[in-house]
Amino acid sequence: MRVAIQGSHGSFSEAAARRRWPDLQVHPCREVKDVVAAVREGQADAGCLPIENSLIGSVTTTYDLLQEAFGDGALRLTHEILHPVHHTIMALPGAPLSGIRRVLSHPVALGQCRLWLSQHLPGAELVSAWDTAGSAEIVAREKNPALAAIAARPAADAHGLVSLADRIEDDPTNQTRFLTFTQAQSVPQLSSAEGGRYKTSLIVLVDHKPGMLALTLQAFGVRGVNLMALQSRPERSAPWTYRFYVDVEGAATDPRVAEALEEIEALAVKLIVLGSYEAWTEGSRPSLPVPPPAHRVEKPAIPLVDRRRHPEGTVVRVRHLSFGGESPVLIAGPCSVESEAMILETAAAVAQAGGDMLRGGAYKPRTSPYDFQGLGVKGLRYLADARERTGLPVVTEVLSWEEVPVVAHFADMLQIGARNMQNFSLLRAASRSGKPILLKRGAGATIEEWLMAAEYVLAEGNPSVVLCERGIRTFERATRHTLDLNAVALVRERTHLPVIVDPSHAAGISSLVTPLSLGALAAGACGLIIEVHPDPPRAMSDGAQSLDFAGFEDLARQVHPGALAGPVQMA
Ligand code: PEP
Ligand code: MN
C-alpha cells in the first residue's frame, strides 16, 4: 500500500496513516495538492491528509483543497483516523534552551504549542516550515545551535537532534483527525446495514437566499440523521459568499441519508459527495456483514402492529405511567391552553381529582383560520410548568413536522390529531422524536387506515404508540361524532397496541362524557382523554363538551374508585 502524505518521513501524517495500514510505503509530498495529484496519477494508492485538530480546529488548507480535488467525482474519502499528537522541541546536541532564537515547524504545530512557547521562549522567532519532520531536518542541516524544531519525538533520533522538552502541546488530549482517500472506482459501496458506524462528508453550495442553508440541514434533521460537523469556507471568486462542508452520521447508501442527499441535490446550487467512510473508533476494525435470515416468514398485511407479534400486548410508558398496564390512565385538561393561570388551575384540579396526566393544546387545528390558534411555544412552557408543579406528565398536539422538535422538547407524549392522522411526513417526524405517540383516529378513517398510520410510526423505529378512538363522522347529527366502540374491541383483538378513548370529541356534549367513558373502559380501553375547563361556557374552544372541575371529579371517582388524591400543594 503506497500512501501519499503532506510532509516527510516521521511526520504525524505518516504515523496516522500507519494506524490504518501498519505496513504502508510512504510517498512524501511537499504540498497538499501534490498528495491529491499523486493519488489521481496513480503514484500512490491512497492519500492521507489532516482535516481537523482538537486544539486549533479546522485545517483550512485541506478543506480548501477538497472542492477542486473531489469536484469531478474521481476521488472518494475512505477512512477517518484519529491520531494523538504530542510535540517535542528539539535542537543540536548540547544546544541549551536559553540559546534558542528561532523555532521552526509546521504552522499547525506552532499553533498547538503557543502556551509553552510564550512561557519558555517568549523572544524566539517562530518560523513556518512545510512540515514538522522536515523542520527537524533543516535544524540538523544548518548546524546552528540557535535553531530548534517542533516535531514528533522520533524525528529527533532520525536527524541526530536531542529533545529540549517533550509533550509541549497546549493540552495533553491534543489529537488530529485525518481523512484518507483513493480513486473512486476502487471504493466498494458501503452500507450501514453491514454494521459499524459510518460518516458521509459533503460540500454544498447554496443560493444566497433566506433559509437555504437551513433547508439543507433540515433535510438531515427531519430524517433523524445526525449532523457531525459543519464548516464554512469563503468562495474565493465571489467575496463574502461561502460553501459549506457537512459531515453526517451514516453511509450515503442508507435510505435516510440517500433521501436527504436527493433532496439537497434538487435544492442546492451544487452538491459534492466526498464519500462515506467508517468513523474512527479506537481499536475498531470493520465488522462482518449480518447474514440474511435463513428462511422467509410470511408477513401479515400490517406487520408491526399485528397482535401476533406481541400476544401479551405492548405496554407504553410515559414517565411513571403505563398505558396497557394494570389500571386505566386518565388524561384530562383543557382543549386549548388559554393562559398560564388557567392551565395551572386546571392542572391542580386534575391532579387533585386523581387524574394521571395533563392534556392541553398549544397548537390548535381549527376549522376557521380566524379562530384561536393556540399559544404556541408559550403554551408549551405553561404546560411544562404545570407538570413541574403537579407531577402530571403532559400530552399535547403537534400539528406539523417543523414543530416536532420544539413540542418534543416540552411534552412527554406527542398527540397526532384526527385531522393529521394520515399526514405521513408528520408521522415520520414524530416517530423520530423518540417520544411516545398518541395517535387519534381520523374522523373519516377506516380502522385499517388508522392502523396503517400507526404502522408508519413503528416502521420509523418508534414502538411507543397509543391508539385513540375519538369518534367518527356518520349520518347521525345529534352528537358531534359517533363513538366507535367496535373499533376499540377490534384493535385490541388485532393489534398489540394499547387503545384509549376520547369521549369528549366523540360526543361533543359534556353530559355524555361520563357514560361514554365507562362504556369505553368496559369495551377494553386502557385509558381516557377528557376535556376539562375551569369555566366551560367561556372556553376558547370545545366548551360544549368540556367538563367543569366537579364533573371531572365525579368521573375520576368512577374511573379510579377511592383514588381521590387530596389537595395538591402548588410548588
Ligand atoms: C383535541 O384533542 O383537542 C383535538 C383537536 O382532537 P381531535 O384531533 O381528535 O379532533
Ligand atoms: Mn378539543
Image (cartoon, grey):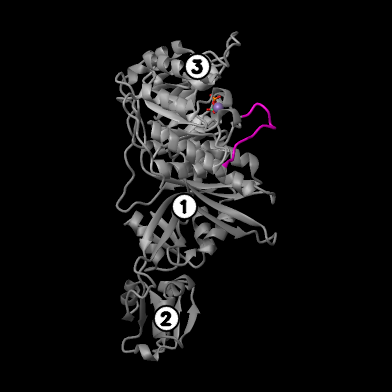
Q: Which amino acid is tagged 2?
A: Leu
Q: Which amino acid is tagged 3?
A: Leu
For the magenta stretch, what is the residue range?
Answer: 366-376
Q: Is 537 located above or below residue 209 in the figure?
A: above
SS at mark 2 in the image: helix
User: Could you tell me what secondary structure mostly forms the magenta stretch?
Assistant: loop
Label 2, label 3: how many angstroms apart (C-alpha)? 81 Å
Q: Is 283 located above or below residue 458 in the figure?
A: below
Percent x, y of residue 93? 31, 86
**Quadrant position of residue 140:** bottom left
Residue 512, which numbered label?
A: 3
| Disc nearest the viewer among 2 and 1 | 2
**Quadrant position of residue 160:** bottom left
> Which residue is denoted by mark 1 in the rendering?
181
Q: Is 151 located above or below residue 77 in the figure?
A: below
Nearer-the-camera pick, 244 or 404: 404
Residue 464 can be seen, yes or no: yes
Label 2, label 1: how many angstroms apart (C-alpha)? 34 Å
